[in-house]
Each structure stands twice: as C-alpha cells, then as structure tokens.
Image (tube, helix red, strand yellow):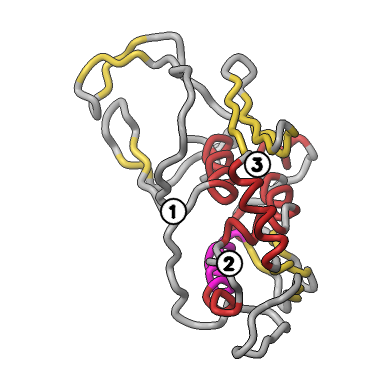
Amino acid sequence: MKPKLYFSIFLVIILLVVLKFCCPKDDDHLMVSFTLNNKSLIQENKKIVIKKPITIENYFQFLDSIVQKYDSLTSYKLNEHLLVRANSWIIDTLKNTDHYIMKERDSFVYNQKEMIVIPKGTQIVLPDSVAIKKLFQSFQNTIIDINIPEFKLCIYGDSLKLFEFPIRVGRNEQKYLKMADRVVDLKTKIGSGFIVKHVRNPDYYNPVNGHKYFVTKRDDGKE
C-alpha cells in the first residue's frame, strides 16, 4: 500500500469519522499557553496558542490532550473532529504533507512523521456553543464523493467542494485472494452508504497472500 492511498484515508478519517479517544499518559504534548477557570464553561470562541511545534507523529496525541483538558469546560462533547472542522486549515496542512504533492514541488522529506503540521505560535480555535451548533449541522450536510474514472475523492459541505484527494480504485479483473479464499471481482463497487466505524491504528494486509504490512515503500524505494 503506497502512501498516496494511506494519506488519503488518513486525512479523511481525521475530518469525518467518529472515534474513541485514548487519554495521553502525561501532559507533555499539551503545549498551550491558554488557561481557563475550571468552574466556568466557555461562553465564546477561545484561542489556544501552541507553544511548541507539533509533528505528524504527535498529531493525534496532541489533539487528544486538548480534548482531555478542555472537554469539561465546554457545553458539548468535545472531540478532535470538531476541533479540526473549526480549524479547517489543519486539513490543508496535512494534505500538503503528502509525498506526491511534495514531489511535484521538488521537495523531499525522508521521514514524513517528523514534518511539522502545527507550527509554534499557531492559534487553535475552541468553538463556543453557537459555533458548535453550526458545525454539527455542517457534519450532517457533509458528503464524500468518490469519482472512480478520475481517481478522486472529494468532500462536499452544502454542495460546496471543501477538499479533494487523489486515491486508488479497483481494477477491471478477477483474482484469487487468499484472505477471501475465493476469486474476487476487483472492480470498485458503486453505490451510496455511511461511514459506520473507524479504527485509529488499523492493521494492513496484502489480500492476495494474507501477509501483514509493517512498512510501505514509496516510488523512490524508501520506506
């Protein structure tokens, strides 16, 4: 599985899918300078100033730490998807770390996990109850459209295209897959549906032979 597909899936699940949060073991990744009175709820949009740069490797843990610290101060159930939708620039930043996008810009990073996605001094908006109501409505009006002929996945909000990602699709062939133990039609099935589950750290397997992937290789041969 090459990173083009991996990062497309990675970015989509950050924005759209409901997940269960893991609580960080320490506060090292809660690098913010904004504090609140624990006895009062947030009544208006607040800005959290990031004191240290956040890398891709620490991205999820960082968002978890914000959720853990500020969830009790909001009148709604805070989660990472609300934070990202309220700060939509995060998705654009993550998208631009894609290997193929950087390659087109003649830029190369050996270890993408070390790339900074939230720079020091950045402000993260913590939405108030009014803003959160609009965000919940926007989730209800969000559609994922997969264009098979164009190898594109687009995210629409109220008919407005918000994001576009290159993806892989099936092939026009039938092949025996060990994991299915039968001959399978590899075409991408068309239709409509809903995202019903998310696994933050999934396992990846080669469906042909059932072997588990531990690393991936880019087109430059590097893992």
Q: Quadrant of residue 163?
A: top right
Residues at badges 2 and 1 in contact (C-beta under 8 Å)?
no
Q: Which mark is residue 217?
A: none
Crowd around label 3: few <14 · some 14–19 · many ≥20 (10 Å): many
Dot 3: what SS?
Answer: helix
How far apart marks 3 and 1 lie (CA) works out to 21 Å
The image shows residue 117, relative to residue 3, as above or below, that is below
Q: Is residue 63 magenta?
A: yes
Give the residue type that dot 3 points to. Answer: His
Crowd around label 2: few <14 · some 14–19 · many ≥20 (10 Å): many
- Please name the predominant secondary structure of the magenta segment in the image: helix
- At x 72%, y 45%, the residue is 96
Dot 2: what SS?
Answer: helix
Q: Is residue 42 magenta?
A: no
Give the residue type that dot 1 points to. Answer: Arg
How far apart marks 3 and 2 lie (CA) works out to 23 Å
Q: Quadrant of residue 114?
A: bottom right
Please give left or right for residue 168 compared with residue 20 in the image. right
Give the residue type that dot 2 points to. Answer: Leu
- Residue 210 location (% of width, % of height): 26, 33
In front: label 3 or label 2: 2
Q: Earlier in the sequence, mark 2 or mark 1?
A: 2
Q: Which residue is mark 1?
A: 200
- At x 68%, y 45%, the residue is 95
Q: Which mark is residue 63?
A: 2
Q: Which residues are magenta?
A: 56-67
Please give left or right for residue 67 compared with residue 181 in the image. right
Residues at badges 3 and 2 in contact (C-beta under 8 Å)?
no
Q: Quadrant of residue 142?
A: top right
In front: label 3 or label 1: 1
Q: Which residue is mark 3?
A: 99
